[in-house]
Image (cartoon, grey):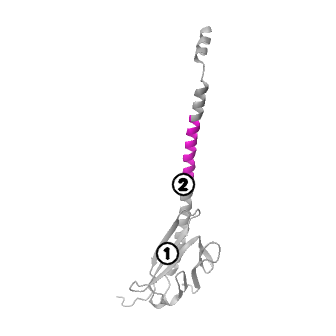
Amino acid sequence: MESLRKRLASLGGFSLVELVLYISLSSIVVGITSYVMVTQLDTYAFVSERQGSLADASYTMGRISNELVYIETSDLVNVENDTITFIDTTGNNVILALDTTGPIPTITRNGETLLSDVVTFTLEYYDINNNATTTIADIRRITVTLTCGDVNNQGNITLTKSITPRNFIYANYE
């Protein structure tokens, strides 16, 4: 029994310096680990928001192009750089425009918001020779460009689509 006591007494335990060193090193490891985890969570949130913005912009671009692809030359009412007015396939008057009257610029269809937080919305019109035109009778192709910002303003998303409406009349078509 006495040899056991001598043996335990000789072990003694940890010194104060060893305990402080252990706590310091443990704190550094925990700090680095938590920094890495917070960075990863921020990156995940950024990617998720960016994917959401891209999905919204893609949906809007698809909706605009689907409507424009079915119009005829005679359906165009007014064309401007950020607005197009036409008659859709059901005979309704449609105005696609950039609305900057509110606090957040939006793309609207007859006043209904299609996409918020729009930085730019541009419509360019081209004739049969790919020359820019605003003469309704000469328009054969429409290029739509929209740029939207993401939630935290950490970059813009720009989509461009060139649309050739199916029902436009082509001169010298063979």
Location of the C terminus (image quadrant):
bottom left
Q: Is residue 31 magenta?
A: yes
Q: Main secondary structure of the magenta part?
A: helix
Q: Which residue is mark 2?
A: 43
Question: Circle 1: is it few (<14), some (14-19), or many (20+) Cα within 10 Å?
Answer: some
Q: Position of residue 9 (x, y in %)?
A: 61, 15
Q: Mark 1: which amino acid?
A: Thr
**What residue is rendered at 50% in x and 84% in y?**
71
Q: Quadrant of the N terminus?
A: top right
* Residue range highlighted in magenta: 25-44
Q: In this view of the protein, can residue 75 be seen by the observer?
A: yes
Near-viewer residue (56 or 157): 157
Residue 1 visible from this viewpoint: no
Residue at which label 1 appears = 145
Identity of the residue furthest to the right in this view:
102
Placement of 32 over or under 158, stated as above or below: above
Find the residue positioned furthest to the front: 17
Residue drawn at x 53%, y 64% as measured from the top left:
155
Residue at image location 58% in from the left, 13% down from the top: 7
* Amino acid type for the residue under numbered disc 2: Thr
Q: Residue furthest top?
A: 2
Q: Secondary structure at mark 2?
A: helix
Whole-angstrom CA distance, mark 1 to mark 2, is 28 Å
Mark number displayed over residue 14? none
